[in-house]
Image (spheres, rainbow, N blue to C red):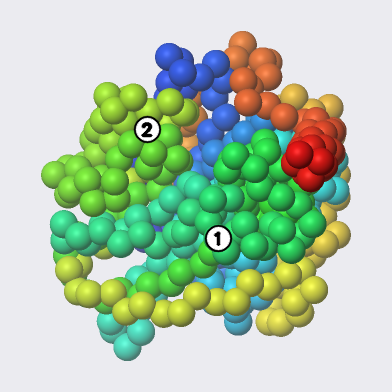
């Protein structure tokens, strides 16, 4: 007798994206959605990735982050999601460097949802992890709660951290070029542009209508959290309609960026959330062998070559088969309709208007610092 299909973790899913050609020549966003992953197949992952400087990093991350996350779930069955997600960020960033993907980057907003039943009561755990300005917002009975944190080089805490890393902020940009202060990739500025995510955790019980919005800054630059939540509630029974409406409104409000937005319904409940403190960030050095490890999954630090998918533009060995416990978008059990990121192949060959290579970043940093010294000398002489 065939094994019964697992119950979907996500009740409903909607996604919409657009190049926004009036303002952008290339599409540098990507997304992923996978349900029923992990040892007990009771976890879903939803993510928006907003690339900059090219598509190499965002393609790599969109193809591999969920795989690394899944491997860590098997490797560390005793760790909770708020511990696993920072490890996945660190491992993915390390794999980018090992794969010699150095000259561009991507922000990331990742939401993991875990559904468990304890003593007959269903519980839904929502954990958000993000770096950069892609954002996750919880919608609950016409109220919203931001469960991510924007990372920009205009924030005092980020400016101080960047200065302590022997870098600088000028005109609201790291080294005068990068408008986010945390990202995956950007290894030319990695001492300042770290990948450590902000992590938040919520635990929910019982009934109502609860959604999560995950979107890039092309949405949040022109739509406030509360407005977005109200739009979702107006379309509470149709996540695809809600996502499409948010995209249309962002365009109407003259968003000047690529636009990607995901709306998921995680529960039918109206009970308040219990807020838990964020977990401390961990690194690869914190890895410990615990519990039973899926024998088909190698240790993260040892992943090399064909074990990690490469962007289509790379000349690499044949991509390996997706982990059996990770469902591809086409196989998802949610509505059986998972839209794919729409990209123009011709556009992908072009360099982004704001593309900056690692060498250019370093050169710009040196030139800017020299100019600042000259200005100080001139002022001193005056």
User: Could you classify mark 1 by the number of other residues whose Cα lies within 10 Å: few (under 14), some (14-19), or many (20 or more)?
Assistant: few
Task: Tell me the mark number nearer the camera, choosing from 2 and 1.
Answer: 1
Position of 239 relative to 54 (above/below) = below
Q: Quadrant of residue 157?
A: bottom right
| Residue under label 2 | 16
* Residue 64 shown left or right of residue 111 in the figure: right
Q: CA distance from mark 2 to mark 1?
A: 34 Å
Q: Mark 2 near mark 1, Cβ–Cβ under 8 Å? A: no
Residue in view at x 67 percent, y 30 percent? 53
Asked whether residue 299 appears in the rendered view, the answer is yes
Residue in view at x 72 percent, y 29 percent? 356
Q: Tag 2's secondary structure?
A: strand
Residue in view at x 62 percent, y 57 percent? 159
Position of 7 relative to 30 (above/below) = below
User: Could you classify mark 2 by the number of other residues whose Cα lies within 10 Å: few (under 14), some (14-19), or many (20 or more)?
Assistant: many
x and y, in percent, of residue 210 in the image: 24, 60
* Residue 331 shown left or right of residue 104 in the figure: left
Asked whether residue 122 appears in the rendered view, the answer is no
x and y, in percent, of residue 188 in the image: 80, 43
Q: Of 246 and 71, which appears nearest the observer?
A: 246
* Residue 134 shown left or right of residue 91 in the figure: left
x and y, in percent, of residue 56 in the image: 71, 33
Q: Earlier in the sequence, mark 2 or mark 1?
A: 2
Position of 206 relative to 49 (above/below) = below
Residue that protrudes farthest toward the top in the picture = 346
| Residue under label 1 | 156
């Amino acid at each position: 007798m065939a094994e019964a299909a697992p119950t979907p973790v996500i009740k409903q899913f909607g996604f919409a994206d657009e190049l926004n050609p009036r303002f952008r020549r290339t599409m540098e966003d990507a997304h992923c959605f996978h349900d029923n992953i992990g040892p007990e197949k009771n976890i879903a992952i939803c993510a928006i990735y907003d690339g900059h400087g090219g598509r190499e990093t965002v393609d790599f991350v969109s193809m591999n982050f969920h795989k690394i996350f899944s491997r860590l779930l098997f490797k560390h069955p005793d760790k909770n999601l708020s511990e696993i997600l920072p490890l996945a960020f660190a491992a993915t960033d390390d794999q980018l460097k090992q794969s010699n993907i150095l000259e561009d980057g991507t922000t990331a907003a990742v939401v993991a949802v875990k559904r468990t039943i304890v003593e007959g009561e269903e519980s839904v755990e929502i954990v958000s992890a993000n770096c950069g300005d892609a954002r996750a917002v919880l919608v609950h009975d016409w109220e919203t709660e931001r469960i991510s944190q924007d990372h920009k080089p205009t924030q005092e805490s980020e400016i101080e951290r960047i200065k302590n890393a022997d870098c600088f902020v000028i005109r609201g940009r790291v080294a005068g070029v990068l408008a986010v202060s945390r990202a995956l990739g950007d290894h030319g500025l990695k001492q300042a542009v770290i990948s450590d995510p902000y992590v938040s955790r919520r635990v929910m019980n019982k009934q109502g209508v609860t959604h999560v919005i995950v979107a890039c800054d092309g949405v949040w630059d022109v739509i406030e959290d509360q407005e977005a939540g109200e739009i979702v509630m107006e379309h509470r029974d149709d996540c695809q309609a809600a996502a499409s409406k948010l995209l249309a409104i962002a365009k109407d409000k003259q968003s000047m960026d690529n636009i990607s937005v995901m709306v998921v319904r995680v529960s039918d409940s109206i009970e308040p959330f219990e807020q838990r403190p964020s977990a401390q960030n961990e690194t690869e050095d914190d890895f410990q062998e615990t519990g039973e490890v899926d024998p088909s999954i190698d240790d993260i630090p040892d992943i090399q070559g064909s074990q990690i998918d490469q962007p289509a533009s790379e000349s690499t060995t044949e991509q390996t088969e997706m982990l059996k416990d990770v469902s591809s978008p086409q196989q998802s059990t949610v509505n059986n309709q998972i839209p794919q990121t729409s990209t123009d192949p011709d556009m992908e060959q072009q360099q982004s208007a704001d593309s900056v290579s690692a060498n250019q970043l370093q050169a710009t940093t040196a030139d800017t610092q020299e100019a600042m010294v000259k200005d100080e000398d001139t002022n001193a002489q005056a």
